Amino acid sequence: MSVKIVLVYQSLLGIYGDRGNSQVLAKRLEWRGVDAEVIAVEPGAPLPADGAIYLLGGGEDNAQTTAVRELRSDGALFSALDAGAVLFAVCAGYQICGHTFTIGENDEVREGLGLLDVETRRGAKRAVGEILTRWTKPDGTTSLITGFENHGGYTTLGPDAAPLAQVEVGIGNDGHGTEGAVQGHVIGTYPHGPVLARNPELADYLLALALGRRLDPLDRAAEQHAGLRRERIALVRR
Ligand code: GLN
């Protein structure tokens, strides 16, 4: 049986190229001989409830409200998470996972999905540019995450959500040093890139979480990627 990667509502949350995350996950499974399929679902069509990983991407304010409404009325994302699936959400997708977020010039408050203990409000200045963070992996070792951020909303974490990483360059959650949030199998983060193409270790972490087992390293792919990654990190630090 193939591992289902569910790409959620690209017509709403697909303007930053985050769909590349689905291709990275599928390719890294394929390289390990594991069958994978990417299922792209648009609003109005039912989401599968048996996905292993669900992906939400970046988008505009109004699309966020529509995505919340559709996901709530569909319901399958919630049952999939109850059954152990992983949700990886970027930027607008991350914000809608929280309790509330604001949209538009007048900062209207909207209810989110309530999957992460976070709140998002408009920040002092829009966060735009390269971002570099240090991610502490479950084994206690750390790794750098590179990407670019582009968001007006600033996110604060409640006690049930842990930061994904610490900011070295950029704004991250709210300019106070943390980036992203993790709560059970729900992971939210700001970097686009797509972030999993720039940071394959993060992709493998999501896959291991979804499959419930360690994955063999992909040495050849890692070698090919290392030079490009070094260049990106040096560029952001400059
Ligand atoms: N509309 C949200 C914000 O500006 C999300 C933007 C995005 O997804 N890049 O905060």
Image: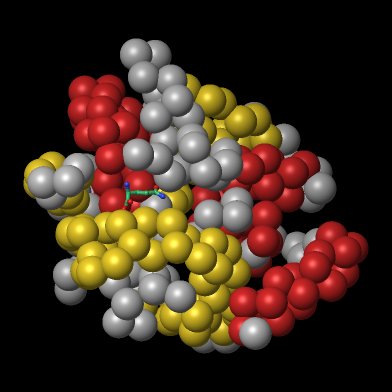
Q: Which residue lies furthest to the top in this view?
A: 44
**Coloring scheme used:** secondary structure
Instruction: Provide residue 55's location: percent of width, then percent of height.
Output: 47, 42
Left or right, 228 with respect to 156, comes to right
Rendering coords of residue 78 (x, y %): 28, 37
Instruction: From the viewer's perspective, tell me whether residue 39 is left or right of residue 37.
Output: left
- All told, the count of numbered labels is 0
Q: Quadrant of residue 59?
A: top left
Q: Residue drawn at (52%, 71%), measured in percent from left and top? A: 131
Residue at x 19% of width, y 43% of height = 104
The relative height of residue 202 versus residue 10 in the rendered view (above or below) is below
On screen, residue 45 above or below 157: above
93 relative to 3, above or below: below
Residue drawn at point x = 34 percent, y = 13 percent: 44
Q: 14 or 211: nearer the eye?
A: 14
Residue 87 in the image: x percent, y percent? Answer: 41, 47
| Residue 83 shows up from this direction | no
Relative image position of residue 108 (x, y in whole percent): 10, 44
Assign the C terminus to one quadrant of the image.
Answer: bottom right
Q: Say which quarter of the image contains residue 37.
A: top right
125 displayed left or right of 88: left
Task: Name the residue located 84 percent from the left edge and 60 percent from the top edge.
Answer: 221
Quarter the N terminus occupies:
top right
Q: Is residue 178 something that shows in the picture?
A: yes
Q: Which one is nearer the viewer's eye here, 152 or 218?
A: 152
